[in-house]
Amino acid sequence: MANYALASFADSLKPPHRLAHLQSRNILCSKAQQLVLLANRSSQTLFVNPQLEMSPSAAVAMSPAIIETTNHLASSPNLGAPIVLPQSHKQRVSNPGRAFVRNALLSHLAAMDVDAGVSDSENGFFVADVGEVYRQHLRWKRNLPRVEPFYAVKCNPDPQVVRLLASLGTGFDCASKAEIQQVLSLGVPENKIIYANPCKAASHIKFAANNGVRMMTFDNADELHKIKRLYPGASLLLRILTDDSKSLCQLGLKFGAPLDTTLPLLKLAKELELDIVGVSFHVGSGSWDPSAFVDAVERARCVFDEAASVGYDLKLLDVGGGFGHDNFETIAAVLGPAIDQHFPSTIRVIAEPGRYYVANAFTLAVNIIARRTVANQEGEAGLADKSYMYYVSDGVYGSFNCILFDHQHPVPRVLAHDGRFLYNEARGDSSVRCSVWGPTCDSLDCISEESFLPYALDVGDWLYFEEMGAYTGCAASRFNGFPISRVQYVNSEKGAEEMMKALSA
């Protein structure tokens, strides 16, 4: 059991009074256990998510667990109050759940004995704050009250996240039979699900038909003929091509009907006697340019007019995803007025946010399982004479697949070193150069080619990475036989706590 946990845990319990006498690394383990138990009683109950160790059906059927918080640390937000968030909503500055995440990380590390080689003690793990998901939902409702969020399950199908969002009344953007099945198992109404995959497997269309999930997208003639054969009663949205050049993940290469094809597609749908109810678009995942949404709304308006010319009365606009946390208010301030300008209030408007809800809610901790020392080149001023290659317990074949598939650049931070717990500590003089590598035997498994940290870390120390909730664990594999990082949950919002308790009753 790690002794470094003691001083920091005492500090977290009594932040105004730093207990310097506990800085010693020679405190008894029994005292550490007492502090861990005290912290759990005073902050939150943690529970492990076995989802990634189970089959999809078993994960869906998993009974909900209660997340407990105390009243003095979590309070219900005033929905009527104006939102008080910095424009950038920087997580490291404003996140009220940081104390909960801190205690969860420390509880886990205090219970591990990496040096003794205890089985699984060095495995990576997530800490997920469902309270952050709850706050993001309130933020959405305040800034885009007209737009109904349909959470993109593909981004992170974590059962606790999906369960909470279902209780909040969100809809769901599903891309497959399995995702539809997961959402339906929670009692979500069929009209709160959109099968937003323009190119679907026949058996998945039949599953949607058999379960009454009518809303689905298309962008080509072949898909229309397939839907006519398998599900003629579907309610269809024409997915149009937009300018996604200013986004992290550009989807236009694969999906979206160019504007010069939309009228012929509408005419074909009319000939096939299919029901077109709306238009959808996606400006790309992680869009940073608000004008992309305005342009897409204007294109959608043109297609609405085309649909009217062939006899359709469209009632639904799906503005897709692409919403991030840093610039959400900026995008909302542009998107909301654009919708109001081009579409009357009788038009239902939905969106498909994914990373917006979950990116900031998940923190990943990894253990340094091996280290390689490299001599620096002469003349590199300001750097130590050595640099280090750290090999950690998760990598790009696991949770860090977001580096390959989602264009992310996770930033390593020191969590524990030399008997000290350093979560959220100031970085100081970060002059020790290092690279960070995953555990597999593939040289592609590189998390960071170059980073600078304030310490030369040792085997057994821990790093952590924030903003790891989007497109991470859901796409992880067991390449080389390495385990998938599990999830522990905390809840920093009383409103979310009450909902989770009700769901588990």
Image (tube, helix red, strand yellow):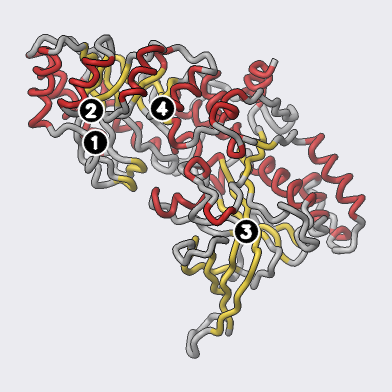
| Residue 269 position in % (x across, y down) | 14, 16
Q: CA distance from mark 3 to mark 1?
A: 38 Å
- Res 325 quadrant in image: top left
Instruction: Work out whether mark 3 precedes mark 1 in sequence or the reverse, and give the earlier one.
Output: 1
Amino acid type assigned to the residue bearing label 4 in the image? Asn
Q: CA distance from mark 2 to mark 4?
A: 25 Å
Amino acid type assigned to the residue bearing label 1 in the image? Phe
For disc 3, the neighbor class at 10 Å (few under 14, some 14 to 19, many from 20) is many
| Residue at mark 2 | 239
Instruction: Work out whether mark 3 precedes mark 4 in sequence or the reverse, and give the earlier one.
Output: 4
What SS does tag 2 mark? strand
Amino acid type assigned to the residue bearing label 3 in the image? Leu
Instruction: Work out whether mark 4 precedes mark 1 in sequence or the reverse, and give the earlier one.
Output: 4
CB contact under 8 Å: marks 2 and 1 = yes
What SS does tag 1 mark? loop
Residue 255: image tag: 1
Residue 259 placement, left or right of 467: left
Instruction: Work out whether mark 2 precedes mark 1 in sequence or the reverse, and give the earlier one.
Output: 2
Residue 40 visible in the shown view = yes
| Residue at mark 3 | 463
CB contact under 8 Å: marks 3 and 4 = no
> What residue lies at 35% left-to-right and 32% top-to-bottom?
332
Instruction: Work out whether mark 2 precedes mark 3 in sequence or the reverse, and give the earlier one.
Output: 2
